[in-house]
Amino acid sequence: MKTRTVHTCVECGTAHPKWSGQCHGCGAWNSLVEEQLASAADQSASTGAAPLASVDLLGDIDALLAQPQPTGIGELDRVLGGGIVAGSVTVLGGEPGIGKSTLLLQLLAWWPGPTLYVSAEESPQQVRARAERLDATRPELWITADATLAGIIAAIEATEPQLVIVDSIQTVTDPNVAGGAGSVGQVRWCAQQLVAEAKRRNVAVVLVGHVTKEGALAGPRLLEHTVDTVLSFEGDRHHALRVLRAVKHRFGSTDELGLFEMTAQGLLGVPDPSKLFLADRRPSSPGSVVAAAMDGQRPLLVEIQALTTPAPPMAPPRRTAQGLDTGRLALLIAVLQQHTGVRLGGYDVYASAVGGVRLSEPGVDLALLVALVSAGNERPIAEDLVVIGEVGLGGEVRQVAHVARRLAEAARMKYARAIVPMSSPEVRGIELIRVRTAAEASLVANPSPRRERVPS
Ligand code: TYD
Ligand code: MG
């Protein structure tokens, strides 16, 4: 067989004819590895005239086949739009230690029919111990540590499961394919074969895919085109909060997100995230403001904190943001300076979204701006206030998506008043303070600033 050499990105799978330091597909650095592919001439020679595959009228296809089976884990079902579809293949990506194996073991514990767990990273004894802790031991849960492609297919054949977990795809190998476990060629080939197996037997398969910062292993993005669903499990290791989102989902929307808390009993769903995020809030402290944010389709009330301290002489002032966008923070500091006269040029500024959540949407701009003013003036804002709005470069306050849902969530959490953009609709149970500009918002929230603290 003739082969040709390409350089493939381990992050996203883009093939390059020549080696380069940066991937043209996803921009990752030092992520290209050499790969041998069958040459085009060779591939077409093997195609030949194939017998006609079955062709059906769309109207004759039974739509019920794509009915999801609820997993029993509410937050997972929310992200998947109801549950797992038979014959579907899902990749669960995330950094090592984030909780992928824990989540999947809990999924296995709930599944009503026979299941197979291919555990190549932990021994069956370790899995058993963990399953006991999680109360996830079940009579119809089969386990194998054999991570060869042939071994996995044989185990599926023997146990006839409805759901197969492969933990992780980066450990699966086929000796007939070049490259070691975790190489681009192995990961791609083995995943393709498992997808074919899933479709052929109508069994649901979940592949775990580690995301490594160093790109040492072929990443889950490589499989995006091959599978039906790509889930990403994220979180800050220092917080218990874990966020599950769909990056791609053939059977539903990718807007929903699932929230979990890592506890000694495994992952617990967080049905009321606003309550979690606001649990430790000290409303009387300056620089603390509650934002009504959206993550996907879900309204979240999150405390935004800001802190300003005089910058050391001769040093450029620091701007540090945690869970918020640093660029947005710099922009809001500039808007404050130009349009409200609050000058933070000589101050170090720290801002954070509390609770380990990451907010990247513009609807939290105004809350962050008000927090900066409150911190700069050392005056707390009223306890019963939430803030919603995007801030433009001209200092104007702009409308944001789903404002009514954000307000309803604020009303539910017993907030009495909201600072909102002019065009916001009335929502029961909460009084609206409509503002046109950032300057107006900071005056309303912080009526009598101690100006002397902020140099002008
Ligand atoms: P794990 O599911 O092994 O992560 P991954 O498969 O993504 O690599 O989870 C790893 C961490 O979760 C581990 O550091 C311990 C913690 N953990 C708990 O806090 N509680 C639990 O009940 C379990 C099972 C794990
Ligand atoms: Mg694991």
Image (cartoon, rainbow, N blue to C red):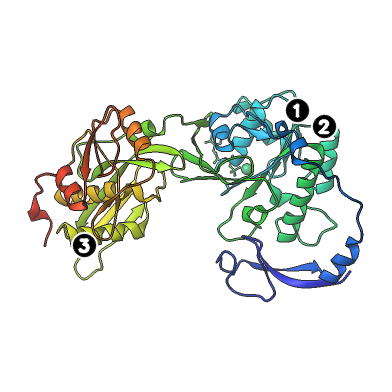
Q: Are the residues flagged by discs 2 and 1 in contact, CB closer than 8 Å?
A: yes
Image-based side of 175 in relation to 71, left or right: right
- Mark 1: which amino acid? Pro
The residue singled out by tag 1 in the image is 114
Residue placed under numbered mark 2 in the picture: 159
How far apart in space, not on screen, are marks 2 and 1 (Cα)? 8 Å
Which dot, 2 or 3, sits closer to the camera?
2
In-front residue for pair 125/357 = 357
The residues bearing labels 3 and 1 have C-alpha atoms spaced at a distance of: 62 Å
Q: Quadrant of the N terminus?
A: bottom right
For mark 2, give the secondary structure.
helix
Residue 432, image quadrant: top left
- Mark sitting earlier along the chain (2/1): 1
Q: Which residue is the site of mark 3?
A: 311
Rendered location of residue 176, percent (x, y): 85, 57
Residue 160 position, x and y percent, is 82, 32
27 and 142: which is toward the camera: 27
**Would you say residue 195 is visible in this rendering?**
yes
* Badge 3 element: loop
Residue drawn at x 75%, y 46% as measured from the top left: 195
Residues marked 2 and 3 touching at CB (< 8 Å): no
Q: Amino acid at mark 3?
A: Ala
Measured in 3D between alpha carbons, the distance from the residue under mark 2 to the one under mark 3, in whole angstroms, is: 65 Å
